[in-house]
Amino acid sequence: MEGPDQLATMGADLGSLVGKMNSTTLSTSEYASIVNMNLFVALLCACIVIGHLLEESRWMNESITALFIGLCTGAIILLSTGGTNSHLFVFSEDLFFIYLLPPIIFNAGFQVKKKQFFRNFMTIVLFGAIGTVISFTIISYGAINIFKRMNVGSLDLGDFLALGAIFSATDSVCTLQVLNQDETPLLYSLVFGEGVVNDATSVVIFNAVQNFDLSRITTSDAFQLVGNFFYLFVTSTVLGAGAGLLSAYIIKKLYFGRHSTDREVAIMILMAYMSYMLAELFYLSGILTVFFCGIVMSHYTWHNVTEKSRVTTKHAFATLSFISELFIFLYVGMDALDIEKWNFVQDSPGKSIGVSSILLGLVLVGRGCFVFPLSFLANLAKKNAHEKITFRQQVLIWWAGLMRGAVSMALAYNQFTRLGHTQLRGNAIMITSTITVVLFSTVVFGLITKPLVRLLLPPSKNMSRMASSEPTSPKSFVVPLLGNERDPEAGGGQEATSVLNPANLRVLLSTPSHTVHYYWRKFDNAFMRPVFGGRGFVPYIPGTPTEQSVHNLIPEGGNN
C-alpha cells in the first residue's frame, strides 16, 4: 500500500516544483523592472551628488547634468544591448502629465513670490496667451511652406499645425533651473508665469487641432477656439482656487494638528493632487489648476496648520518637485537615443539636421515676434518707469523662453507615435527633430542663460534689496497676495492705509497695483480670512503644538 502513496507524494512534490519554476519564469519581467528601477534610482542619486559638486558653477545646473547623465547611460545601454535598446523605460506622456508634472507646478505656485506675480499678471497673460498664438501662427506657417518642399514624409495640415502647438510650448521646468527668483524676481515672475499660461494655451491649441475638422475651418470655429481658451482659463483657475480654499476650511475647522500633524500634511498633499486630476477629468488645464491651488494654499491653508507641519509641507513639496525635475531630464536624456526612431532617418541624416535647424529657427523668430512688440504694449500701460520692461530684460525674456522640454516631447509623442512607437518615416523625422531641438535648446540655451543674466543685469544694491524684500523660507509664505514691502498687519497699518487709499480717479490710474492691493486687503480681511483662516486669523486651541510654541515665545512679564 505504500507504493501508490509514495508515488502520489512524489507526484505532488513534482507538481509543486513545476509550479515554482513557472512562477519564477513569470516573474522574470518583474525582476527586470526591479533592476531598471534600481538603476534609475542610482542615476537620480548620481545626479544629486554631481549637481551638488557643480553648485558653484556659473554654467552647469542640475537639469543639464541630468540630461548628460541620461545621454551617457543611454549610450552605455545601447552598446551593451548590441544597438537594440537605449533606455530603461519607454517615454510615456501619461507618466509625465499625471505623475511628474503636478508636483513641479504646484511647488512653483506654492513658493512663487506673489507680489511680483500678481503685479505683472496682465503682462504674464499677454505673453502666455496672445504671445503663444503669435508663435503658433509663425511656426505653423513656416512649417507648412518649408516642409512641403522638403518631402519629409506623408504629413497633412493637422501635423503641421500640431508642430506649431508643440514648439510654441516653453519649458517651465527648465526655467525653474536656470533662473533665480531671488536674484531676478521680475524676470523670473514674467518668464515662469508666462510659461504656465503658455503650456495651458499650447495644450488648448493642440487639442483643438486634433478635434476640429481642418478641411473646412469657419469663422465660428475660430470664435469657438477663443471661447474654449477663456472657458478653460477661468474654470481651471476657479477649480484650483476652490480646492485650495476647501483644504483651508477643512483644516481650520477640524484642526487635525491637535491629534496628528501627519493628517493635515496628508490633506494638503492629496487635495492639491486631486485638484489636478479633477481638472484632467473635466478636460480642463491641470497645469493652471494646480498652480493656482498652490498659490491659494500658501496664502490660507499653510497658516492653518501647526508649525511642524509648515516646515514639513514646505520641504516635502520642494523635495517632490526636485526629484520630479531630475526624473524628467534623466528620462528625456535616455530616450533621446531611442534606436527605433533614428533608424528611419539614418539614410538621410542631412534632412533630419535640416528639419531640426528650421524648427529651431522658427522657434527663435516666433518668440521674437511677440516678446518685443508685446513688451512695448505692456510698457505703454505702465506709468512708473521702474516697472517698465527694459530692452535688456526683453532680450533675457526672449532668450530664457527659447528652451523646449518635456511638454514638447509629450505632445510630439502624442501626435506622431502610438504608445511610443512609430513605423512612418515622416513621423519618425518629426520625433527625432523634436528630440534634437529639446536637447540643443536645453543644453546650449540653458548653459548660456546664467552668464547672459550676469552680463545684461549685473547685480546691484538695489536689486539685492528687491530680492531680499521677500525671503524665500519659511517666512516668504506670509507675504500677502499683491503685498508691498510693508504689511499693514505687521504694523503701520494706518500709515499704509493712508498711502494706498485711492482718493480719486487719478490715484487709481497712476498706481493701479496699489489700488487693487488696497481693496483686495479689505475684502480679504473682512470676508476671506475669517472663514478660511490665514495669517493672524487662526484661533489657538489650548494644548496644541501651535499654541504651545506661541506661548513659549511670550516673555513672562508680557501680561503686565
Image (cartoon, rainbow, N blue to C red):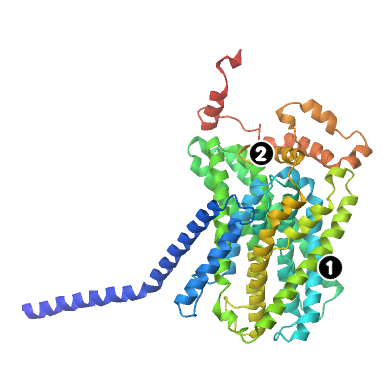
Query: Would residue 79 be found to the left or right of residue 521 on screen?
Result: left
Q: Nearer the viewer, residue 104 or 256?
A: 104
In front here: 344 or 6? 344
Q: Is residue 209 visible?
A: no
Residue 96 vertical position relative to residue 75 in the rendered view, above or below: above
The residue that mark 2 highlights is 471
Q: Position of residue 187 (x, y in %)?
A: 75, 50
Which labelled disc corresponds to residue 223?
A: 1
Quarter the C terminus occupies: top right
Q: Residue at x 43, y 63 (%)?
A: 38
Amino acid tagged 2: Pro
* Residue 500 image offset from top left, x and y in percent: 84, 33
Label at residue 511: none
How far across and down, in percent of the image, does residue 31 sit? 38, 69
**Looking at the image, residue 558 lies above or below residue 454:** above
Work out which quarter of the rendered image holds the N terminus and state it.
Answer: bottom left
Question: Which residue lies at the image location 68% right of the left edge and 78% below the top edge?
Answer: 353
Identify the secondary structure beneath mark 1.
Answer: helix
Residue at mark 2 to residue at mark 1: CA–CA distance: 44 Å
Q: Quadrant of residue 139?
A: bottom right
Q: Residue furthest top?
A: 560
Q: Residues within 10 Å of mark 2 (few under 14, many from 20)?
A: some
- Quarter of the image for residue 497 reads top right
Residue at the spot 71% in from the left edge and 52% down from the top edge = 238
Of the numbered discs 2 and 1, the one sitting upstream in the chain is: 1
Helix or strand or loop: what does disc 2 sit on? Answer: loop
